[in-house]
């Protein structure tokens, strides 16, 4: 995998320039990692590890999401007249399909019941590609932190972490390519078409934000029939991982992992900014341990009681928060 050259000029290139186009296409093609899901050597799991893996509620959602994303991205290559960028988008579609194949191989090997959905056919190439891309920007940001949480907590055994590490890094490549492609495409539009393109992107982003707000509000609430929900699993997965972690600590971890994964690539490429900016804004308003202690003091809760509840250390006594 390519890393940032030590002598490279870190100044961002002008969006829409020939240099930006060449760098974007070559970055994506040159950092592709070869592997075949069907030839993966799946590690043997203990009964406890297997039960934890099978107990995660998101496998069906993950398979369905990859079906939509892979077919959307593969079709979106037709949007590009430039051969280099078209090849890069075709490769991204192949990688998304490979993610779907990997999930099928995993669920088959460990006997996790999922239904394979019918092939998704996009209706509007550009709008569907934008929706999938902005959705990945949200999901990947949280997935980076949750993957690190599962790795560091031992929820996933090291051998299984090793299998999925290339997938996580591919997600970083995908969203880095996407945000640069959006800026490149907008820059090539006539000036009078750019406002409409911005508004369309803004509408799609707001839809993604609204979806995640609905999920956040439902966290900890019983679902109809008592069944767990897999919608927007990246926002609720820390509950399934059994991790005692506050939202503040989770956001810190997501930011750290996002920066670490993006550091692999050329500094001239524009980084995803929206979701990290939302996370940093939330960190400014979510109270830390000192703020919790002050708030508890105003409610007459003693330090001993806070320590017993895990509030002073930042450990969340209720993982559903």
Image: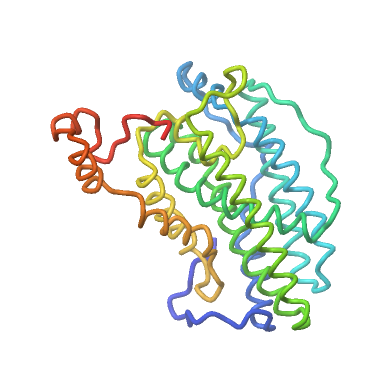
Residue 98: quarter of image = top right
Q: In the drawing, does residue 316 fall left or right of residue 150? A: left
- Please tell me which residue is depicted at 80% across the width and 71% down the height of the picture: 83
- Please tell me which residue is depicted at 67% across the width and 64% down the height of the picture: 29
Can you give x and y, in whole percent of width and height, for residue 59 in the image? 63, 30
Can you give x and y, in whole percent of width and height, for residue 62 in the image? 65, 37
Q: In the drawing, does residue 256 fall left or right of residue 166? A: left
| Image coloring type | rainbow
Vertical order, 60 against 143 (above or below):
above
Q: In the drawing, does residue 43 fall left or right of residue 136? A: left
Can you give x and y, in whole percent of width and height, for residue 46 in the image? 47, 19
Vertical order, 18 against 48 (above or below):
below
Can you give x and y, in whole percent of width and height, for residue 156 in the image? 46, 32
49 vs 159, nearest the viewer: 49
Q: In the drawing, does residue 289 fall left or right of residue 61? A: left
Residue 200: quarter of image = bottom right
């Amino acid at each position: 995998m390519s890393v940032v050259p030590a002598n490279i000029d870190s100044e961002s290139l002008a969006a829409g320039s020939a240099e930006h186009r060449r760098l974007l296409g070559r970055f994506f093609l040159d950092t592709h990692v070869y592997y075949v899901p069907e030839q993966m050597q799946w590690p043997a799991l203990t009964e406890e590890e297997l039960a934890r893996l099978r107990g995660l509620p998101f496998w069906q959602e993950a398979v369905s999401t990859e079906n939509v994303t892979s077919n959307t991205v593969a079709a979106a290559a037709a949007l590009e007249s430039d051969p280099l960028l078209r090849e890069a988008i075709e490769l991204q579609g192949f990688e998304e399909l490979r993610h779907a194949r990997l999930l099928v191989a995993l669920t088959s090997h460990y006997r996790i019941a999922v239904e394979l959905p019918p092939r998704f056919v996009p209706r509007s190439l550009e709008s569907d590609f934008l929706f999938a891309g902005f959705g990945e920007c949200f999901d990947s940001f949280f997935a980076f932190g949750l993957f690190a949480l599962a790795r560091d907590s031992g929820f996933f055994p090291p051998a299984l972490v090793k299998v999925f590490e290339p997938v996580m890094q591919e997600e970083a490549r995908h969203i880095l390519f996407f945000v640069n492609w959006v800026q490149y495409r907008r820059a090539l539009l006539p000036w009078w078409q750019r406002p409409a393109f911005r508004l369309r992107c803004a509408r799609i982003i707001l839809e993604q934000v609204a979806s995640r707000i609905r999920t956040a509000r439902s966290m900890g609430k019983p679902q109809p029939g008592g069944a767990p929900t897999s919608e927007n699993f990246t926002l609720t997965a820390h509950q399934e991982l059994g991790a005692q972690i506050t939202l503040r600590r989770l956001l810190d971890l997501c930011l750290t992992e996002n920066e670490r994964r993006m550091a692999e690539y050329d500094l001239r490429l524009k980084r995803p900014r929206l979701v990290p900016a939302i996370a940093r804004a939330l960190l400014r308003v979510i109270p830390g341990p000192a703020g919790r202690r002050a708030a508890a003091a105003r409610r007459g809760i003693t330090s001993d009681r806070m320590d017993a509840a895990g509030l002073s250390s930042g450990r969340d006594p209720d993982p559903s928060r």
